[in-house]
Amino acid sequence: MEIFGIALVVLLLVVLAATASALLRDGRGHTPPVTSDQPWSARDLPSVNYTLRIF
């Protein structure tokens, strides 16, 4: 009976280690790095806010 208990604990530890490893590796290498090649611009947005333009 003790062998089953030890096997269950070992199996539980292996499952927890595999889960932690998968969570730590998740998403790495799949997202491109953030770069700012071009300066920010507002394009065709107005320079005066909307509430001042209606009066």
Image: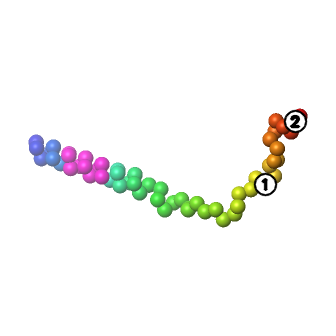
Does dot 2 land on a helix, a strand or a loop? loop
27 inside magenta stretch: no
* Percent coordinates x, y for residue 23 in the rendering: 40, 52
Tell me which segment is drawn in magenta: 8-17
Q: State the image coordinates of residue 5 (x, y, percent, origin top left).
A: 15, 43
Residue, disc 1: 43
Q: Which mark is residue 26?
A: none
Q: Amino acid at mark 1?
A: Arg
Instruction: Please tell me which residue is depicted at 29% across the width and 49% down the height of the picture.
Output: 15
Closest to the observer, 52 or 32: 52
Who's the residue at 44% across and 55% down the image? 26
- Closer to us: 30 or 36: 36
Magenta span: predominant SS is: helix
**SS of the residue under disc 1:** loop
**Residue named by callout 2:** 54
Disc nearest the viewer among 2 and 1: 2
Q: Is residue 13 magenta?
A: yes
Mark before the other along the chain sequence, 2 or 1:
1
- The extreme left residue here reads 1
Q: Where in the figure is residue 49, as x and y percent of width and height?
A: 80, 41
Amino acid type, callout 2: Ile
For mark 1, does the 10 Å Cα neighbourhood hold few (<14), some (14 to 19), or many (20 or more) residues?
A: few
Q: Is 55 above or below relative to 5? A: above
Q: Quadrant of residue 1?
A: top left
Residue 54 at x, y = what percent? 87, 35
**How packed is label 2: few (under 14 Cα within 10 Å), some, or many (20 or more)?**
few
